[in-house]
Every structure is written in structure tokens, then in C-alpha cells.
Image (cartoon, rainbow, N blue to C red):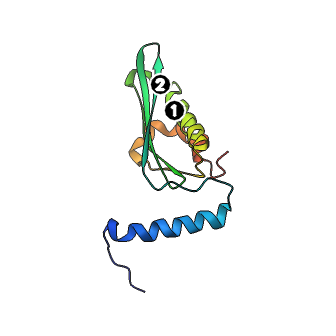
Amino acid sequence: MRVIGKGRNTLEPFVEREWSAENADRFAGAVAPPNWEWREYCLAAHDGEALIGAAIFRVRGGVAHLKNVISSRARRSQGIGGALVDEFVRRARELGCHKLTLVTYYESYSSFPIYNSPVSNPCFR
């Protein structure tokens, strides 16, 4: 076996074929067939007219990828990020997703309470 770098366009047909087969094997019709087009969604948290938080996520192939969660500096540590993550989980489930992903960085230490939400739970409550 050799492991070499390849361009995304070269690998995409393989990934789509294998993910489709994997989803069919694992979920056997329990979920809708995956849509392989990227769809992006934005969530906004408001307090009256004021925008106080936002989240951006993308969905592809039955997998929801949480890209960004941010709350206004003046409103941090008030549960806004957690509420956005909860809504992300709800929307992902509503969209038929069966997997969630989240990428974070160690420097995001101020948002650690968010990781007590269902998105960090591998059981996808």
C-alpha cells in the first residue's frame, strides 16, 4: 500500500461512492438517502432587535458540520452558544442527519461549557 497526496477532485467520486455504501449498510433505510451537495445554514440568536449570537453549519451526505459559533462579547457566558448548539442539533436531526462533526481549537477555552451539550455526546441524543 502507498499513501500519496491527491487532489480533492480526484478523490471525490470514491468518497461519495463509499459513503453512500457505508450509509446504506449502517442505516439500512433508517435515514433518507444522503444529498451530496453542500448546503449551508445560518442560525441567529436575538434579544429583541439586537443580534447577540450566530452559528453556521453545513450539511452534506447526512453529516452536519458545525463551522462557527459566536456570541457578542458583552453577552458571553450567558448560554447563547449552548442554545445555538442545541438548535444546531435539532435542525440537523430535522434535516435527516445521522452524524455531527465539530472542529475546535485549544485556544477556544472560553467556550468549554458548550461541550456539555448533546453535540459532544457520541450517542447523538
Type of the residue with mark 1? Leu
Identify the residue position indicated by label 1 in the image: 84
Instruction: From the top left corner, tell me how far across and down residue 94 is, in percent.
Output: 60, 40
Instruction: From the top left corner, tell me how far across and down residue 107 is, in percent.
Output: 38, 44
Instruction: From the top left corner, tell me how far across and down residue 62 is, in percent.
Output: 55, 53
Q: Is residue 69 above or below residue 7?
A: above
Query: Which residue occupies the extreme top position in the image?
Result: 48
Count of numbered badges drawn on the protein:
2
Query: Which residue occupies the extreme bottom position in the image?
Result: 1
Image quadrant occupied by the C terminus: top right
Identify the residue position indicated by label 2 in the image: 45
Instruction: From the top left corner, tell me how far across and down residue 68 is, in percent.
Output: 41, 40
Does residue 108 appear left or right of residue 122 in this picture? left
Q: Secondary structure at mark 2?
A: strand
The reply to whether callout 1 and callout 2 are in contact (CB within 8 Å) is yes
Does residue 27 appear left or right of residue 85 in this picture? right
Instruction: Please state which of residues 32 and 84 is positioned toward the viewer in this rendering.
Output: 32
Q: Residues within 10 Å of mark 1 (few under 14, many from 20)?
A: many
Instruction: Give me the C-alpha separation between circle 1 and circle 2.
Output: 7 Å
Q: Residue 12: which quarter of the image?
A: bottom left
